């Protein structure tokens, strides 16, 4: 009895039930001939050549798997390295970049009983700002009704943005000052940026604070659509320290301890740093 013939380019090769060939051998016999069905193979030379090619294919197949294995190992090692780098950055509080922004802090004193009137003017400020042109980072008002105070929390990428902003809100600002008065104006930023503002803000009695080189922005995002900014729900903490005469250098030497002890990720820090008015 014979098994079902194997087709090889129009030639039929029949095998006895007890005969087996390695699986690659079927492909090696494509186009080859046999002298007898159910008999011996055509020649030992043909078989030797077939076995030699089979061994080469097996060796090639083994090398292929070796390459695949090395590639997988390489990907896993690279993934581990990237994970370690990310974890180290997070644990060390790696910031996005140095905080070179200019922060403007006006504080308005509102007469008793006129707070609602003053607050109604907020919309005029919002309608006159041009965030993209002013290179604005954030902008808004906060109110202390118990003490009749209004703060404007605002920050810009540079001094030029501040100057453009002041031009844009000139009319709303003049209207607000007809109700209340500017009790205090502080500006924080790099020394080079503050120098551009000293002249224009001098008449307003502005105080200038030079930021420390350790100041960082830990979270900053440019809006995809400047006409649809996200609602600012951040909490801003402003601490003022009055340093004893002759001890400023000693006080500034402590800044690095604050930077080292903070945990930006756990604290949800957006920006952090010191600014000095010597």
Image: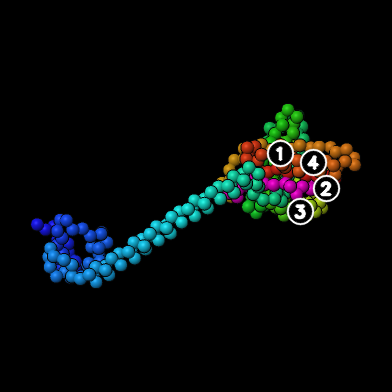
What residue lies at 42% left-to-right and 58% top-to-bottom? 66
Residue with the mark numbered 2: 203
Q: Name the residue carrying label 1.
A: 261
Q: Label 4, label 2: how many angstroms apart (C-alpha)?
A: 34 Å
Residue ID for mark 4: 254
**Marks 4 and 2: which is nearer the front?**
4
Q: Residue at x 53, y 49 (%)?
A: 80
Work out how far the residue at label 1 is from the one at label 2, CA to CA, in angstroms.
Answer: 40 Å
Q: Earlier in the sequence, mark 4 or mark 2?
A: 2
Q: CA distance from mark 3 to mark 1?
A: 29 Å
Q: Is residue 115 left or right of residue 42?
A: right
Q: Which residue is mark 3?
A: 193
**Is 247 situated left or right of 38 in this image?**
right
Is 217 in the magenta?
yes
What is the x, y in percent for residue 200?
79, 52
Of the residues tagged 3 and 4, which is closer to the observer?
4
Q: CA distance from mark 4 to mark 1?
A: 11 Å
Query: Of helix, strand and loop, which one carries label 1?
Result: helix
Segment tinted magenta in the rendering: 209-224
Query: Of residues 251 and 157, which is closer to you in this image?
Result: 251
Q: Is residue 108 visible in this depiction of the protein?
A: no
Q: Nearer the viewer, residue 130 or 251?
A: 251
Q: Where 170 falls versus 14 (above or below)?
A: above
Q: Name the dominant secondary structure of the magenta segment.
A: loop
The chosen color scheme is rainbow
Element type where label 2 sits in the image: helix
């Amino acid at each position: 009895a014979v098994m079902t013939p194997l087709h090889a380019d129009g030639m039929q090769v029949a095998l006895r039930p007890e005969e087996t060939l390695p699986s690659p051998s079927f492909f090696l016999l494509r186009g080859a001939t046999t002298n007898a069905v159910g008999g011996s193979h055509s020649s030992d030379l043909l078989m030797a050549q077939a076995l030699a090619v089979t061994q080469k294919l097996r060796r090639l197949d083994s090398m292929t798997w070796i390459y695949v294995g090395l590639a997988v190992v390489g990907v896993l090692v690279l993934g581990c390295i990237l994970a370690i780098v990310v974890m180290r950055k997070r644990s060390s509080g790696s910031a996005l970049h140095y905080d070179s922004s200019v922060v403007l802090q006006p504080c308005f004193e509102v007469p008793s009983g006129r707070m609602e009137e003053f607050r109604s003017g907020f919309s005029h400020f919002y309608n006159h700002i041009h965030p993209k042109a002013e290179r604005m980072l954030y902008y808004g008002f906060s109110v202390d009704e118990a003490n009749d105070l209004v703060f404007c929390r605002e920050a810009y990428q540079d001094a030029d943005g501040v100057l453009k902003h002041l031009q844009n809100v000139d009319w709303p600002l003049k209207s607000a000052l007809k109700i209340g008065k500017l009790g205090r104006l502080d500006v924080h930023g790099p020394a080079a940026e503050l120098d551009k503002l000293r002249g224009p803000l001098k008449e307003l009695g502005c105080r200038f604070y030079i930021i420390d080189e350790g100041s960082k922005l830990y979270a900053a995002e440019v809006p995809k659509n400047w006409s649809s900014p996200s609602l600012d729900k951040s909490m801003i903490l402003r601490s003022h320290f009055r340093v004893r005469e002759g001890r400023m250098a000693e006080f500034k030497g402590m800044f690095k301890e604050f930077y080292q002890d903070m945990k930006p990720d756990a604290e949800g820090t957006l920006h952090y740093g010191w600014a000095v008015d010597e």
